[in-house]
Image (tube, rainbow, N blue to C red):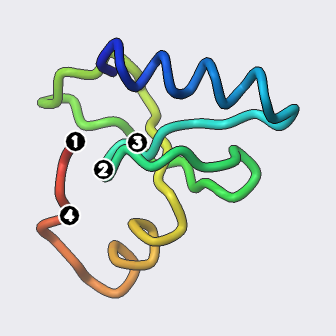
């Protein structure tokens, strides 16, 4: 996550009381209750076992999209 994304997310968290996560594919800020959890990619630079996807990226994945843009 870049410093700019962290700044935007931090500002959003201050203004909005709900928990927000960034989509692992498109970077869109999404309420955690609306996001989908997937296994993290071991070849990716992330150190997390799990990542969050926004509803749009999740739907694309469910319909068979293979080349989702990676942030």
Dot placed on the residue nearer the N-terminal end, 3 or 1: 3
Q: Would residue 41 be found to the left or right of residue 5 on screen?
A: left
The mark lying in front, picked from 4 and 1, is: 1
Gap in Å between the C-alphas at discs 2 and 4? Answer: 7 Å
Residue tagged by mark 1?
A: 71
Q: Would residue 3 be found to the left or right of residue 32 on screen?
A: left
Q: Is residue 30 above or below residue 13?
A: below
Q: Tell me what residue is drawn at x 16 percent, y 71 percent.
A: 66
The quarter in which the C terminus is drawn is top left
Residue 13 figure quarter: top right
Gap in Å between the C-alphas at discs 3 and 2? Answer: 13 Å
The mark lying in front, picked from 3 and 2, is: 2
Gap in Å between the C-alphas at discs 3 and 1? Answer: 16 Å
The quarter in which the N terminus is drawn is top left
Determine whether the residue tagged by mark 4 lies in a helix, strand or loop: loop
Image mark for residue 53: none
Gap in Å between the C-alphas at discs 4 and 1? Answer: 10 Å
Mark 2–mark 4 CB contact (< 8 Å): yes
Residue tagged by mark 2?
A: 25
Dot placed on the residue nearer the N-terminal end, 2 or 4: 2
Q: Tell me what residue is drawn at x 60 percent, y 49 percent.
A: 30
Q: Tell me what residue is drawn at x 47 percent, y 53 percent.
A: 53
Image mark for residue 68: 4
Dot placed on the residue nearer the N-terminal end, 4 or 3: 3
The mark lying in front, picked from 3 and 1, is: 1
Determine whether the residue tagged by mark 1 lies in a helix, strand or loop: loop
Gap in Å between the C-alphas at discs 1 and 2? Answer: 5 Å
Residue 36 figure quarter: bottom right
């Amino acid at each position: 996550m870049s410093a700019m994304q962290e700044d935007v997310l931090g500002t959003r968290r201050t203004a909005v009381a709900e928990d927000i996560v960034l989509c692992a594919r498109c970077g869109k800020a999404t309420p955690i209750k609306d996001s989908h959890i997937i296994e993290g990619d071991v070849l990716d630079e992330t150190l997390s076992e799990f990542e969050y996807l926004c509803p749009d990226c999740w739907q694309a994945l469910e319909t068979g999209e293979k080349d989702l843009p990676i942030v």
